[in-house]
Amino acid sequence: GKKGKRSKKSSKKGGSKAAVNTAAPAAAPAPAVSAADEAAPYALFNEMVRQAKSTPAPAATTDSGLPPGLEAILSSLTLPQQILCKLLCSPILNQRHLFDQWTTSMDTNQEKLQFVSQLESMDKAYPNGLAGYIKNAKILLEKSKMGVNPLDGWKPSVPTGEAFEIGTKEFDAVESIGMEELGRVGFVLVAGGLGERLGYGDIKIGLPTEMTTETKYIQMYIEYILALQNKYANVKLPLCIMTSNDTIAGTKKILTENKYFGMDESQVTIVQQGEGVPALLDNDAKIALDPKSQYKIMAKPHGHGDIHSLLYSHKVAQNWVEQGIDWCVFFQDTNGLAFHTLPLALGVSKKMDLVMNSLAVPRKAKQAVGGIAKLTNDESGEQRTINVEYNQLDPLLRATGYPDGDANDEKTGFSPFPGNINQLVFQLKPYAETLERTKGVMPEFVNPKYKDAEKTIFKKPTRLECMMQEFPTVLEGDMAKRVGFTSIANELCFSPVKNATDDGVSLQAKGTHPGVAASGEADQYAASRIILRSIGCQVDDAKPETYRGISVVPGPAVVFKPDFCACPGDYKVKFPNPSKIKISARSTLVVQGAGVTIESLDLDGALIIECEEGATGVIKDLKVQNEGFARIPVDASDSNEIIAMRGYRVEALATKNIVVKKGGKLSFEDFGTPSKSGATNNTRAMVDPKNLDLSKPDSAEKADGKQECGCVIL
């Protein structure tokens, strides 16, 4: 599967709720606004908008019929801004209320100009402008009020796809197919979120994935891409990051300050969502003002479905096709297990010639997770394989010939409709062709919460949204049939960090995964242990421990950098004698570097192995016993928010460090104190940190002719 290995040097160049929820994310099987939706009262809408835009804006001295406060500043607006404001005040859009409270005083002119600038920005960001947004909103709000079921006329069936278990021949065979494709993959990171919900004041991709190495999420993702590039690729593998107004500055900062974590800057494309779409007050789609200011629109996120239009408008997908990229994978910002099963999913896509492949997890019937289903339209015969929300899947099945509804399969114990986790693999050329046809515009939905039974009053402003997993709804012809799934246990592919610790405690008490920092870290260690055991290694599990109310299995903490092991298929190569690998429950193992192989190891403590670039070496007959790492509980008041959200800090009591140098030479160092048994196996020297003089090199360090210390501070 190697596609011409590049040297590392060369690779771096480059009250009442709607009876039928029309707002269920990804439930709509067809574009939100169809040809039928253009019927009355909207048949003349587009023509009226065209006429309104083509009519010259009135001069500032003319009685325009506009609100006085708006008329007073017309001369300060550009012609496009004047036309937009006039259009918003027209009866067809009915947004005059936005300007009615304005005074004619010049004291607020600056605020008014900023307000119009915000409107203009929103108008440009939406594919058909604010006029199109309001039109679509009126259509969808009317459907919601009437209780229209977007799934009427569609019959569900089990979708095309394959389910796997780690360690089976079937898994290995399909993964090997996917490993052949790893050198031609582009990566799309959907990273529009801040960490405020987690108690973190910066962008989520800047959080550490685990505290053993403190590797950040964005760092881990880039290291993975570079590992694939160095091993499999003839080209530089590209990364596109979707940001928001909230995260764009932080994303650029973390990349710049860390020199893109070794990736060439030219490989990275950053695209930015707009400031959001206008919130809507009522069924007439009246735009809401910010409660804190009459000179600001209340904006809400439009959803991650915008990624498709951004990849189109920035020509990302088309450029990648021209660069020789065959696949692209969409992944989310804080899932530390995102790539363990990428080769498996690629193998399924290649084998089945899928245009879109959803990585999925086994799902219990009626579990509160959207299920992937194939829908067939009774009249047209069209097929769509999409995510259907759990609260719609069961009634849909019962209404279309499945008397038991969403029921578990007797053989597997799971629903035949796997759970969606929003990690997607696209075959790039047909994906790019579809973007050219659709401009990447996804169908929208609306989800108003009503105060009254008549559904006329909203509890709070709503907005239109779109989801990236809705892409199958815009596929046509044969492409629409080439959509499927790859299912694997969530322990190997999905552990998002998205919840505050207190919220996670409540979720875990209900039997739901907490989705917090502590569980995300524990699951990363666990995934590596599962893979090690699948090939025959003896790896014990620690007993559960509780930190700030979250129960986790803390170890052994196993961290394999992607250049050592990027996927399960690498483990058999790196551990050729798995029966000779033994790792105790309290251990910590960190391995970095492509050239190291571990033939036999008995670990009871902490071991860190680093292989220098270009070096190769074998770890054999190594027994390590030391005090290792410890987790020290902390409470929510800890000043370090990264530690506080976990409920513990990691302290290195003693470690063995091994560096594999060129020529196969191994350098051994021990740090900290011996184990309680006094064992000092394979140690070169024991170092007492209290007596360690870091001001000058020791005798071993002087040998290289340099004056810098080579100490590692843990």
Image (cartoon, grey):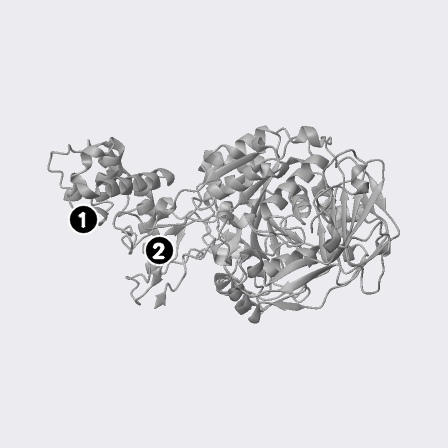
| Percent coordinates x, y for residue 371 in the rendering | 55, 58
Which kind of residue does numbered mark 1 sit on? Asp
Helix, strand or loop at mark 2: loop
Numbered tag placed on residue 462 in the rendering: 2
- Can the viewer see residue 177? yes
Q: As drawn, which residue projects farthest toward the right?
A: 621
- Estimate the x, y position of residue 404 in percent, counting from the top left: 55, 68
Decide if residue 622 is on the left or right side of residue 318.
right
| Residue 585 tag number | none
- Mark 1 surroundings within 10 Å by alpha-carbon count, few (fewer than 14), some (14 through 19), many (20 or more): some
- Residue 65 lies, in percent from the top left, at 13, 41
485 relative position to 194: left or right: right
In screen coordinates, is 290 left or right of 664?
A: left
**Is residue 357 in sight in this rendering?**
no
In percent of the image, x 67 and y 31: which residue is there? 11
Q: Is residue 371 above or below residue 479?
A: below
Label 1: element kind: helix
Kindly identify which residue carries mark 1: 100
